[in-house]
Image (cartoon, rainbow, N blue to C red):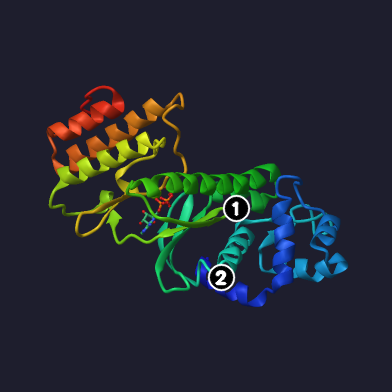
Amino acid sequence: MPSLIEYAREVFRRLDENHFKVLRVIEANLSRYEVVPREVIFRESGLGQRAEKLLRKLHEYKLIWAPRGLERGFCINYNGLDLLALKNLVDRNIIESLGRPLGVGKEADVYDALSPKGERIVVKFFRIGRTSFRRYERHRTSLLSAHSYLAASIKAASKEYQALRILHPRGVKVPRPIARSMHVIVTGFFRGIELAIIQQLEDPLRILGDILENVRKARDAGVVHSDLSAYNVLVTPEEDILIIDWPQWVSPRHPMAKTYLRRDLSGLIKFFKRKWKVSELPEECSKLVEDLCGETFLA
Ligand SMILES: Nc1ncnc2c1ncn2[C@@H]1O[C@H](COP(=O)(O)OP(=O)(O)OP(=O)(O)O)[C@@H](O)[C@H]1O
Ligand SMILES: [Mg+2]
C-alpha cells in the first residue's frame, strides 16, 4: 500500500479545482444518498455533463467508488475524503507539506507535517471502521455502513477538536488545536514518546502526579478523557507530559462519567505499579484520586 503522503502528492498534482468541486458535491451528499446519482453531481457541481470526465478520473485514482455500477452514481471513500480535507487545509494556509507517519493506529493515522511558516505540526486522520470499510468496498454491500463510518470519523474529529479547544486554553497539557477539516485535525507537535514504551524515568511518581493533576483540571473544565492509558500520554526527555487522543471524552455529568474516570485511573495506576514498581501512592496523588473518584482506591 503506498503511503498516504506519496499518494497524496501524486494525486494532488493531477487534480484541478473542478475535480475538487465534484468531490465536494459527493461529500456534501454523504448523508442524503447511498450512492450520489450522477444527475445530482452534474447539477450541484454546476459543471453539467463536463463532470463526466472528472468523475472518471476520480474513480481511476480511487478517490470515489461506484458500488452499484458507474451508471448509478458514486460514493466518496477515505482516499477522497483525505484529499478533500488536505486541499482545504492547504488552501487555508494551515499545512505546507505532509511528512512521515508518527503513528498508525486502529482508528487514526497521525502524520508529522510543516506549516507554511516552517513550524512542525501534527495531522491526525480519523479512520473509523477502516478495516471493515475495505471489506465493504470489496464485497460491495452495506453501503449505509460505509457512509456511516465516514460520518463517524468526521464526528470523532470534531469531538476531539472540541475537547482540545476547551482544554488547551485552560492550561491542561493537551496538543494545541490549530485547525479541523472534516475527519482531520491539526495540532501542535510535541517531542515525546508514549509513556507505555519508555524504558527509563527519572521520577515516575512525579509523572503520575502530573497526569492526575491534568485529569483533574480537565474534569473541572467539563471533560473526562474515557480512554486514558499509558499509550495516550507522551513524555519528553525532560519528563514533561502531554495527554493525547480525546475523541471519546464525555462530560462529568454523563451518566457513565464516574465509571469511565475510575477505569481510566485504575488502569493508569495499575500500569505504574507494575512497570515502575510504585507500591503506595504519595499523599498528593491519593488526594487527587479521591477527589476524582470519590474514594481512595488502590487498583
Ligand atoms: N501532538 C503530537 N505530537 C507528537 N506526536 C503525536 C501527537 N499526537 C499524536 N502523536 C503520535 O501519534 C500516535 C497516535 O496518536 P493518537 O493516540 O492521537 O491516535 P491513535 O492512537 O492512532 O488512535 P487509536 O487510539 O484509535 O489507534 C501517538 O501515540 C503519538 O506517537
Ligand atoms: Mg492513541
Residue 101 position, x and y percent, is 42, 64
Tell me which residue sits at (26%, 42%) in the image: 211
Residue nearer the viewer, 12 or 296:
296
Q: Residues within 10 Å of mark 1 (few under 14, many from 20)?
A: some
Identify the element where label 1 is drawn.
helix
Residue 75 in sight in this render: no
**Residue 67 as seen in the image, left or right of residue 191:** right
Residue 271, position as x, y percentages in the image: 23, 40
Compared with 224, 183 (above or below) is below
| Tag 1: amino acid | Arg
Number of other residues with Cα within 10 Å of mark 2, as a class: few under 14, some 14 to 19, many 20 or more = some
Residue 96 is at least partly visible in this image: yes
Answer with left or right where residue 149 lies relative to residue 120. right
In which quarter of the view is residue 46 placed?
bottom right
Residue shown at 38%/30% (left/top)?
260
Vertically, is 170 above or below 26? Answer: above
Q: For marks 2 and 1, give the one nearer the viewer.
A: 2
Residue at 79% x, 62% y is 45
Residue 98 to residue 188: above or below:
below
Ligand 1, seen in the image, is in the quarter at bottom left
In this image, 289 relative to 155: left or right? left
> How far apart, in angstroms, are the residues tagged by discs 2 and 1?
17 Å
* Residue sitting at x 76%, y 66%: 55
Q: Which residue is mark 2?
A: 7
- Quadrant of residue 240 within the rendered picture: bottom left
